[in-house]
Amino acid sequence: TDKAVVRESLLAAEQNRILTIGETAGFTQMGGIINFFNEKGNLRFEVNLDAAGRAGLELGSQVLMSAEIIREDRRRP
């Protein structure tokens, strides 16, 4: 499935310290770092801090102030 392909790609990117950016529902919950989405006609973004940490990336406070912060469910497969 498409989600399986995304998850596989995200795992490969994580091992290579790559900033992953998407625009797909559930992208950050699958391990992506930044995901853009539309909310009431406004472009917004969410950040997965757990994924960023695993990739060895540190995001600046200016970015984080504007973002919706996502934390992963540790029970995910």
Image (spheres, grey):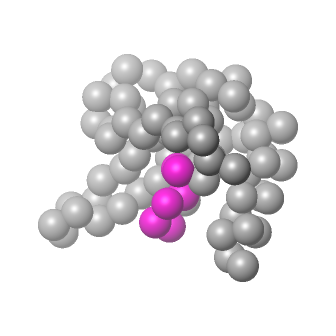
The quadrant where residue 51 appears: top right
- Name the foreground residue: 62 vs 10: 10
On the question of residue 21 being in view, the answer is no
Screen quadrant of the N terminus: bottom right
Q: Can I make out residue 39 in this image?
A: yes
Q: Residue furthest left?
A: 40
Q: Is residue 36 left or right of residue 59?
A: left
Q: Position of residue 73 (x, y in %)?
A: 52, 40
Query: What secondary structure is the magenta-colored segment mainly?
Result: loop
Q: Is residue 61 left or right of residue 18?
A: left
At 69% across and 50% down in the image, what residue appears?
77
Residue at the front extreme, as displayed: 75
Comparing 37 with 75, the one in front is 75
Vertical position of residue 29 compared to residue 19: above or below: below
Is 71 inside the magenta-drawn segment? no
Q: Answer with left or right where residue 77 lies relative to residue 23.
A: right
Q: Is residue 45 above or below residue 56?
A: below
Task: Spot the residue most to the bottom.
Answer: 1
Q: Looking at the image, how many numbered discs can be counted on the residues?
A: 0
Query: Who's the residue at 50% across and 26% down the image?
Result: 59
Image quadrant of residue 54?
Answer: top right
Using the rendered view, name the quadrant where residue 56 is placed: top right
Q: Is residue 27 magenta?
A: yes
User: Residue 24: image x %, image y %?
Assistant: 50, 67
Q: At which x and y percent is residue 64? A: 37, 29
Q: Is residue 63 left or right of residue 23?
A: left
Residue appearing at x 51%, y 30% in the figure: 49
Residue 61 x %, y %: 37, 20
**In this picture, which residue range is highlighted in magenta?**
23-29
Vertical comparison of 18 with 38: above or below: above
Q: Residue at x 72, y 58 (%)?
A: 7
